Amino acid sequence: RALAELQKKNEDLLEQLHSQQQLQEDLQTQLHQSQRSCAQLRTQILVYEGEMARAQGQLEAERQNLEEEKNRVIEEAFVRAESEMKAVHENLAGVRLNLLSLQPALRTLTMDYNLLKRQVQDFPFMLDQAISQAKQEICQVISEVSSTNQELLHKYKREMELRKKCHNELVRLRGNIRVFCRVRPVSQEEEQDCVDASSALSFDSDDDAVLYLSSKGRVMRFWLDKVFPPPATQEEVFQELQSLVTSCIDGFNVCIFAYGQTGSGKTYTMEGVAHDPGINQRALRLLFSEVTEKAPDWEFSISVTVEIYNESLREPAGRHVSEKLDIRLSPDGSGRLYVPGLTQVGVQSPEKSSGCFELGHMNRATACTNLNEHSSRSHALLIVTVSGYNTVTGSRTQSAGKLNLVDLAGSERISRSGAEGSRLREAQCINKSLSALGDVINALRCRHAHVPFRNSRLTYLLQDSLSGDSKTLMMVQVSPLPANLSESISSLKFAQRVRSVELSSCSSTSRRQDNSSASSSPTHLDSPPVTPVPLPISRASSAGSTLSSTSRSSSSRRRSQSQL
Ligand SMILES: Nc1ncnc2c1ncn2[C@@H]1O[C@H](COP(=O)(O)OP(=O)(O)OP(=O)(O)O)[C@@H](O)[C@H]1O
C-alpha cells in the first residue's frame, strides 16, 4: 500500500510534472510569440523613427523656405512703401501748391457769397417791384387782347352771317329746288336679255346738265341741274350735294328725295350697298365730321327712320311697328311739324346709326312686283335734326336744321307693276302720295295761294322742307332700258316741272295758312286727297315746250352762278 501510495504519488507527481512541462511549453510558445511581436514593434519603431527624421528634415526645409519668403516679402513691402510714401509726399506738395493757388479764389468766392447774401436779402423787395410791374404790363396786354378779341368776335359773327348769306344766295341762284338725274348702269342679266340696252339714252360730253332720250325716231332733250351717267360713283353723286347737307348745320331745312320708277336705282342712291354706302350714310358721316371739326360744342341729335306705308306712318326702328303714328303741329309755336310718339334716337357717331339703318331697312315693307325683285312698296324717310350751340359767340342756331332723306316708292303705273289685291291697294296708296307730291309741286310752281301739303302724309311731313327757305334736291332716277323708256320720259318730265318750282315767301305764307288750319283740325289728314292726280304727270306739256322754258331759266341761272 505504501508502495502503491508512493507509486500513486509518483504518478501524480509525474502527471504534475507533465502538466508543468506542458505549461512550460505553452509559456515558451507565448514567449516566442511575444518575442516576435517585440521584434515587429521594434521594426515599426525603427520605421517611425526614420519617417520622423524625414518629416523633421522636410519641416526644417519648409521653415527655411518660409523664412526666406518672409524676408523677401518684407523687402518688397518696404520698397513699395517707400515709393508710395514718395508719391504721397509729391501729392502733398501738389496739394499744398493748389491750396496756395485756391486761397485767392476762396477769397473771391467769399466775396461773391457776401454779395449774393446781400442780394438775397434785397430780393423780396425787388421781386415785389417786378411783380407789380409785370401785373401792370399783363393787365395792359389783357385789355389789349380782349379788345382785339371783341373785334375779332365781331368780325367772326359778321363773317358767319356773310357766309350764311352767301351760301343762301348761292342756293337761291341755283334754285331752292335742284334736280339731279342719275342713270343706273345696265345689269349683266339685262345685258344678256337686251343687246342694245343703253342705246335709248345719250349724254352731252360738253354739258353735264343735259340728257337725250330717243324714242320712236324722235330725240328728246331734258335739261336738269346735273346728269350723272351710269359710271358715276356714289362719291361723285354725294360731292355734288354735300353743301346742301352741311347747310342744315346752319339751321336750314333740307330735303333730298329720290324719285323714279321701280328698279331705277333710288334705294341704291339713297341707301347704297354695304361696301359703297349711299347718300344717307355719307350725309350722316359728313354732318358728324363737320360738327366735330367746327366746334366740339355743337349739340346734335339724329332721329329715327320714319316709313310711310299705305299712307300710315310707321317707325321701323321702334318696337311697335304696326302702330300708326300721327303728324301734328309742334306746340312750341315754331310752325314745325312733328310726329307724336316718334322716338328721337340721339346718335353720337355715324357708326352708331348703322343699327338704326339696318332695323329700318329690315322692317321696310318690300314685296316682289313684276318690275323689281326687291321693290320697295313704301316711302322711306330718314329725318336728321342738327341743333348747334357755339361757345365762342354764345349763340345757338335759330332753329334745329332738319335733313329729310327720302327714298320714295316706285312711281310706275299700277298696270305695269302687275299688282293685285292688297298689293294693288298699296300701289294705289303709293300713287296717292306721289300724286299729292305732284300736286304740291304744281301748286308751288304756279305760286298758288294754297298749297295742298295736307293731301297726304308724305307731303305733310315734307312740308317743312318744301316751303319757305328750305332747300330741296330731287334725284330723279332713270333706268337705261328701252323697255322703261315711257316711264323714264314721265319721270324726267316731272323732274323738269319740279325744277321750275321756286320756294318763296308766297309758299311759306300758304304753309302758315295751311298750318293754322291744321292746328285746328289735325285729323283732316285722314280725309281722301282733294285732287288725286295720278303720276306720271300728264303728257300735255310736250318735251319741246318744256325744253325752251327750262333752257332759258337754266342759262339765266348759270349766268347768275358765274357772276356770283
Ligand atoms: N348706280 C348703280 N350702280 C350699280 N347698280 C345699281 C345702280 N343703281 C341701281 N343699281 C342696281 O339696280 C337694282 C335696282 O335698284 P334699286 O333697288 O335701288 O331700285 P329702286 O328704284 O329703289 O327700286 P324700288 O322702287 O322697287 O325700291 C339693284 O340691284 C341695284 O343694286
Image: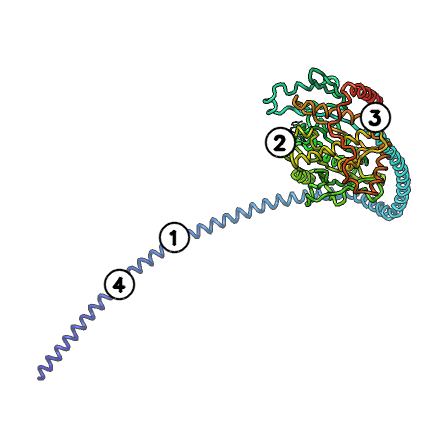
Which residue is tagged 1?
54
Badge 2 or badge 4: first in the primary sequence = 4
Q: Do the residues labelled 1 and 3 touch (CB within 8 Å)?
A: no
Question: Crowdedness of circle 4 by 10 Å Cα count: few (<14), some, many (20+)?
Answer: few
Residue 249: x %, y % from top left: 79, 36
Q: Which of 15 and 504 is in front in this view?
A: 504
Q: Is mark 3 within 8 Å of ligand 1?
A: no
- Cβ of mark 2 under 8 A from ligand 1: no
Quadrant in which residue 527 is drawn: top right
Residue furthest out toward the bottom: 1
- Asked if disc 2 and disc 1 are in contact, CB closer than 8 Å, the reply is no
Observer-side mark, 3 or 4, equals 3
| Amino acid type, mark 4 | Gln
Residue 555 position, x and y percent, is 81, 20
Q: Label 4, on which residue?
A: 35
Residue pointed to by mark 2 = 373
Q: Horizontal and vertical percent for residue 340?
A: 76, 44
Q: Distance of mark 3 from mark 2, alpha carbons? A: 41 Å
- Residue 512 vertical position relative to residue 207 in the rendered view, above or below: below
Quadrant location, the C terminus: top right
Q: Mark 3 points at which residue?
A: 173
